[in-house]
Image (tube, rainbow, N blue to C red):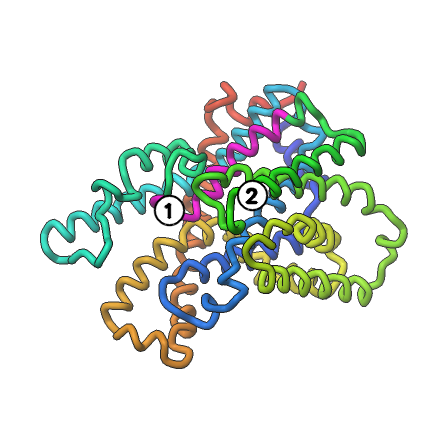
Amino acid sequence: MVSVSKQDIQARASSPFFGALDGFRGLLAIFVAIYHTYWPSWFNRSAFLENGPIIIDLFFVFSGFLLFTLYSNRITNAEQGLVFIKKRFARLYPLHLFMLFVFLLFACARVFLHFVGIASLDPGEILPFQNGASESVGTLVSNIFLLQSMGLHDTLSFNVPSWTISVEFFAYFTFVAMLIWFPLKKTGHFLFLGCVVLSIYAMLAVLKPDMNITYDLAFFRCLAGFYTGVIGSEIYRRIKSNSAIENMGFGTASFIEILILSMSTAFVIYCPGKLQFFVGPILLMFVLTFAFDKGIVSRVMMTGVFKYLAKISYSIYMVHMIIAVIFYAVISKLVPSEWFLQGINGDLLLVPYLAVVFTLSHLTQKYVEVKGMKFILGTSFLTGRPRREILSKS
């Protein structure tokens, strides 16, 4: 009997690590946290962040790229597929459920404070669990089952950023089905997949004004990004041993990285509206460029600061919204609204805000993400046996 610990060590040792892409996850999570602040600042009024929702698509591409790289030859039957789903569920759900509970408490607190007369309603404000409120019993149930952005509702609810968790989790089922019943092996398979991705972007372009698609057609948006990452993974596999790439110098790699980063940034800033539906090639170039970790940008993104931000990036993404809401509610009571528009006051306020986000994200990563994942993997949930038993091989 081969011990599980030895298998895990060997698997981790042989697993590829994309340091720059990992670092970008942390940086992008910060951009999202700033984007969702409620007070004006130079950062969240910039063209980059005003068109910033498209940044989310990079997360989908990163997931497709990494998961296909890791699992393209490791899921061939239903049991292996269930193990994969269990791992992803264990990775995503504990923090989602924890933050849903936090937002539920916040919603109840709002109702209570208005009931006792401590708080008053702002114009157009609807209290949770009243007619027309986004926080209802129905949306609560949908959030519990990760269905909140699968087209069941006409609005986002509770922890708004969790819409991506909803659609990506169900994208995993299509991924498993593809690997088991329609494995991608030939060039033609990937060309067909590329046509499917292009068709999704074309459909969304007809139906929507831009890529800020969340509660209704978000699943298709996720699929387009995710399978763009899958295609990128295959291209990476085929070209990574190319002599020109292997022998590429630091200077040349740095030039290419800076060029692609500049092009990607320019696309976000100068291509709003319908032009955003042409994001696919940009996403593909971005992930392929930084997968090789060869240039100056990659070196920066692989430094300790960005490694740490990558480690807590999921917590940053899931935790920041409640902090932004409470932060603004408190600050707006202490200072007049004109204060935010004076000089760099709004930008300076980002410093304590992000400090709180990082602190709480550190704690939730350690005590909710990690412990919750270990708990789920140690149970017989979904697979019928704990992960230890499934991974053991005679």
**Is residue 101 or residue 65 the one in the foreground?**
65
Q: Position of residue 238 (x, y in %)?
A: 82, 41
* Quadrant of the image containing the C terminus: top right
372 is higher (above) or lower (below) than 84: below
Which residue shows up at 66% across the image and 43% down it? 229
**Is residue 164 or residue 11 the one in the foreground?**
164
Looking at the rendered structure, the kind of residue marked 1 is Asn
Q: Which residues are magenta?
A: 156-177
User: Could one spot residue 355 in this view of the protein?
Assistant: yes
Q: Position of residue 319 (x, y in %)?
A: 40, 52
Looking at the rendered structure, the kind of residue marked 2 is Val
**Is residue 25 or residue 148 the one in the foreground?**
148
Predominant SS of the magenta segment: helix
According to the picture, the residue beneath numbered tag 2 turns out to be 206
Magenta region includes residue 170: yes
Q: How many marks?
A: 2
Residue sticking out furthest to the front: 206
According to the picture, the residue beneath numbered tag 1 turns out to be 159
First in sequence: mark 1 vs mark 2: 1
Q: Position of residue 336 (x, y in %)?
A: 26, 74
User: Could one spot residue 1 in this view of the protein?
Assistant: no
* Separation of marks 1 and 2 at Cα, in angstroms: 29 Å
42 is higher (above) or lower (below) than 363: below
